[in-house]
Amino acid sequence: MTMDPTARPPRASTRARTATAKSGAVKTTPAETTPAKTADAKTGRGRKKGVAEAKAAPAAGLEAPRPAADPRPTPAPPRLVAVSPPPVSPPPAAPRPAAAPAARPAEPGDAMSACPASAIDFDALAQNMARLVEEGGKAVAEYVRAHEQGEAKGGLADEAADAVRSIGRIAEYWLSDPQRAVAAQTQLSTRFIELWSMTLRRLGGEEAAPVAEPARNDKRFADPDWAKNPIFDFLRQAYTITANWANDLAAKAETVDPHTRDKAQFYVRQIISALSPSNFVATNPELIRATFQQSGENLVRGMKMLAEDIKAGGGSLKIRQSDGSKFQLGVNLANTPGKVVFRNALIELIQYAPTTEKVLARPLLIVPPWINKFYILDLNPEKSFIRWAVEQGLTVFTISWVNPDERHADKDFAAYMKEGIFAALEVIEAITGERKVTAIGYCVGGTLLSCTLAWMAARGDDRIDSATLFTTQVDFADPGDLRVFVDEEMIHTIEAKMEDKGYLEGSKMATAFNMLRPNDLIWSYWVNNYLKGKEPMPFDLLTWNSDSTRMPRANHSYYLRNCYLENNLTRGKMVLDGITLDLAKVKIPIYDLAAREDHIAPAKSVFVGAKFFGGPVRYVLAGSGHIAGVVNPTTKPKYQYWTGPQPTGDYEAWVASAKETPGSWWPDWIAWIVAQAPQMTAARQPGSAAYPPLADAPGEYVRMKA
């Protein structure tokens, strides 16, 4: 309910006026009051007298009835600030006797200027709070229902236990030495004393430099009120001080083994991200403003989405990162024309329709990762690497992996090689008449392709005549951020989970990848979706990212142990289908693409792995990360790339001498492909008499949900 600010209550003096509301708070100063002319008791002369004309209720910011004007001289009152809506800031310092007030910094209350209390509809707010409780009950009911009916896909008990153990080792390091513990505590206390001092100076009307500013690119604190309002400024700086201190404790625990220290840093980062004041309505000025402006409707919408996302996650929260309803496979995602020409228990093989009269005689086989789905290379016509490759005159075949279930529990790495890559090679030869192909492997698909090349080299099989690796690791001595998930204990836990159903839930892998960037991939959506009540924007990349896949038990266990845990491939100890693999026997030309900011397959790790191949390697370093470094179309290039000699020596030295080229690396790659086999032939339509088309691209396997 609101009060009309123009309505005036009865009063004795008709000359008195209401104090004006500014920035959502009633502010009464000597300069702002309406003077009343009275007779001075000593001189009898008329003079101007300041009268306090209104009393403002701080919580509501509404004008109150004013008393009649007092005929006695009244000293000018101090400047009053009432903050609306909450949080209520401490009162400013007493006014100074100076004739002219000094310029002041932004004060408590300025943050809420967009939402004066007189504009708040308290009836609507109360109704929406009741609706919020109702929607919250639905969310809780959905969570309970999924767990009672056995639909829940597992909790976080194992991860929580591992976090406690890892952080406990860090605590033990600091607390075992009293001097070390006191030094750490003193460091934190000193910073907070500095922060308190700065805040008090600001509240007293002084300018004061920040004690601990967040990173410039930290979008959580982008709203101006985080810096303008001393209270919110205190919160963000206190958070920054504590976060930096906790990170330092984990990083500087020198006697703790490196793997435990890495895990502790990872878990500390998760806790710090979760406790940011930007994640809570009461401590985020933008959320306070939105909540009062919308009378709490934003929270009702957010709670409704929370209940929906708990239901979609089968009792666990599956945060929506994109409005997936705006995308449809085969329509505006993965819509490059083609046909499914082969299908078995593990793959569908897609052949894409040509767009040129002549094509390169040598076909291209793409081996995508089975963690997520192949259409990362065919998001839309503007970003599609597959469509672009077809336009360059390539006959493109792509493997689309099945989304495995309990029937695929025993499909191991060798099965993915034989029923995946080898099956595809046989079909390609039957359709095109070409025995030799060039192949691309992306991420784990590239690791499988590398293992397959070593296996084929040992057997004298030369059907793959050149290969391209996209952000692929073959040496796992430095496995990137994923190393925190890999040790004997954690792999044993994962294997125990897979033993029950025969696969690892796709949500587990999705959560692991999201936790690598919690502020961007978890908490930004928590705030946007559930606190602001906004549907996320439709974004093809994030729609693909949320389209997770399961991992079959045998395959995933082999991959984790032989690659991440034991690094057997480059050590010459990996045995695949009875053959010990040796990358040095792989003599074919390789185009090895790394991404400079990749945290999953670090560029330095890719560089080190490239040195294990026995043939010519063109190492190319793309700008950006694991996805954007690869999907960098020629029509809208965002990043550059670097080229140099065959990898030898140190990665840093190679980068220092590399040639930087603006734009996409795609033209460099197609020039390399053509140089391997420039012969041309007539364009080929998908399928053949022996392999008639089974379905339109992108097929059926890609539509299977985890």
Image (cartoon, grey):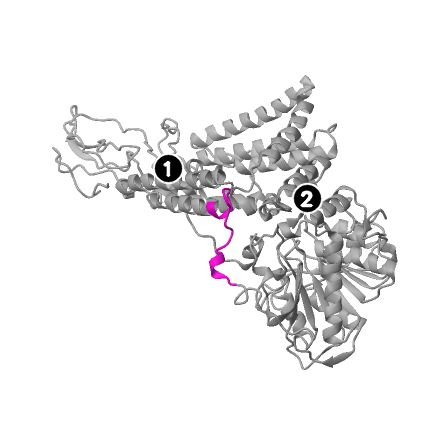
Q: Main secondary structure of the magenta part?
A: loop
Residue 267 screen position, x and y as percent: 62, 35
**Left/right of residue 396 with respect to residue 31 in the rendered view:** right
Q: Which residues are magenta?
A: 311-328
Residue 604 is tagged as none
Name which of mark 2 and mark 1 comes first in the sequence: 1
Residue 514 lies in the magenta-colored region: no
Q: Nearer the viewer, residue 241 or 376?
A: 376
Mark 2 vs mark 1: in front: 2
Which quarter of the image is occupied by the N terminus?
A: top left
Asked if 445 appears above or below 127 in the picture, the reply is below
| Location of residue 358 by image quarter | bottom right
Q: Nearer the viewer, residue 492 or 54?
A: 492
Residue 259 screen position, x and y as percent: 72, 35
As shown in the figure, which amino acid type bears the numbered disc 1? Gly
- Residue found at x 63% / y 58%: 402
**Left/right of residue 329 with respect to residue 564 in the rendered view:** left
As shown in the figure, which amino acid type bears the numbered disc 2? Leu
Residue 109 is tagged as 1
Residue 183 screen position, x and y as percent: 65, 22
Residue 428 screen position, x and y as percent: 73, 70
Name the residue tied to disc 2: 482
Residue 318 lies in the magenta-colored region: yes
Element under label 2? Answer: helix
Label 2 environment density (alpha carbons within 10 Å; few <14, some 14–19, many ≥20): some
Element under label 1? Answer: loop
Label 1 environment density (alpha carbons within 10 Å; few <14, some 14–19, many ≥20): many
Asked if 14 appears above or below 464 in the picture, the reply is above
